[in-house]
Image (tube, rainbow, N blue to C red):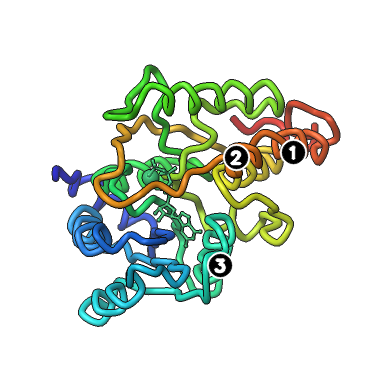
Amino acid sequence: MACGTGRYVVVCAIMNRALVIVPTYNERSNVAELASAVRQCAPTTELLFVDDNSPDGTGALLDEIADGNKGVHVLHKPGKQGLGRAYIDGFQWALARDYELIGEMDADFSHNPADIPRLQAAVAAGADLALGSRYKGGVRVINWPLNRLVLSRAATLYVRLSTGLPVTDPTGGFKCSRRAVLADLALDAIRSNGYSFQIEMTHQAWIRGFRIVEVPIVFDERRSGASKMNGAIVREALWMTWRLLWRNGGRRRPPARCRGAS
Ligand SMILES: Nc1nc2c(ncn2[C@@H]2O[C@H](COP(=O)(O)OP(=O)(O)OP(=O)(O)O)[C@@H](O)[C@H]2O)c(=O)[nH]1
Ligand SMILES: [Mg+2]
């Protein structure tokens, strides 16, 4: 796996204490390799796995990995509470410590650890929130069935039309933000649990006037294990966007006092 180490060293000199949060549910076959790939590609970036007591024993394996590596942390939760709750718990864990750069990625290698330094570099260069985008400047999705790609592209258009959120990949979960963004978000007000968590989080940052930058990434089908995608997650996203529009006073742009951010 090619890692941009030179740029990474520069980013780390500018911004201290970086963390990437990885929610896990039945990812036993991926986590060991992911932890070592992240540590290799972004050596000073720490990892927080948030596991919902996965029945396949992911949590126990994560404890073993963390035992041998002080840059790896594990937050154990009592049972499956959904992706959104896992991220919120992870953000709160990070905010209770002194991390300056807080990122997120999936455990299944759909997100390439080698891209972490590029996301961090975007924040170091002035973004408040860097979003990995599969669709900025063209489609970069490998090995997905056509119906999955169509659904994802339709979701992008739907989010843009219903909320005005000006990003090309609002459901993506490969991100990096400044601590100040997460500290400012109303995490307890976030209601989404599936992909719409990503939409809701980015929408909150956007209407607060934070500077959002999209970083092109290549997205691959999960390497192993099973998807947790289901109809309920899609239905939640369908109504959530209208709720976001309502919360923003019916506006498809940030309130005037927050405008000026890109
Ligand atoms: N802690 C926790 N993690 C979850 C939960 N649901 C999904 N995840 C994790 O969230 C990440 C994204 O979930 P995926 O199943 O890969 O969803 P996806 O990427 O949209 O679907 P695929 O492309 O089919 O893999 C993975 O790391 C999952 O293990 C959950 O309820 N709790
Ligand atoms: Mg996945």
Ranked by sequence position, the earlier of labels 3 and 1 is 3
Give the residue furthest to the left: 1
Mark 3 residue type: Asp
Q: Is residue 129 left or right of residue 113?
A: right
Determine which quarter of the picture holds residue 198.
top right
The residue carrying mark 3 is: 89
Residue depicted at x 81% and y 41%: 247
- Marks 2 and 1: CB-CB under 8 Å? yes
- Of 74 and 13, nearer the camera is 74
The residue carrying mark 1 is: 244
| Residue 123: percent from left, percent from top | 44, 45
Vertical order, 94 against 150 (above or below): below
Residue depicted at x 47% and y 38%: 172
Q: CA distance from mark 3 to mark 1?
A: 22 Å
Mark 1 residue type: Leu
| Residue 129: percent from left, percent from top | 51, 44
- Marks 3 and 2: CB-CB under 8 Å? no
Ranked by sequence position, the earlier of labels 2 and 1 is 2
Q: CA distance from mark 3 to mark 2?
A: 17 Å
- Of 212 and 81, nearer the camera is 81
Helix, strand or loop for disc 3? helix
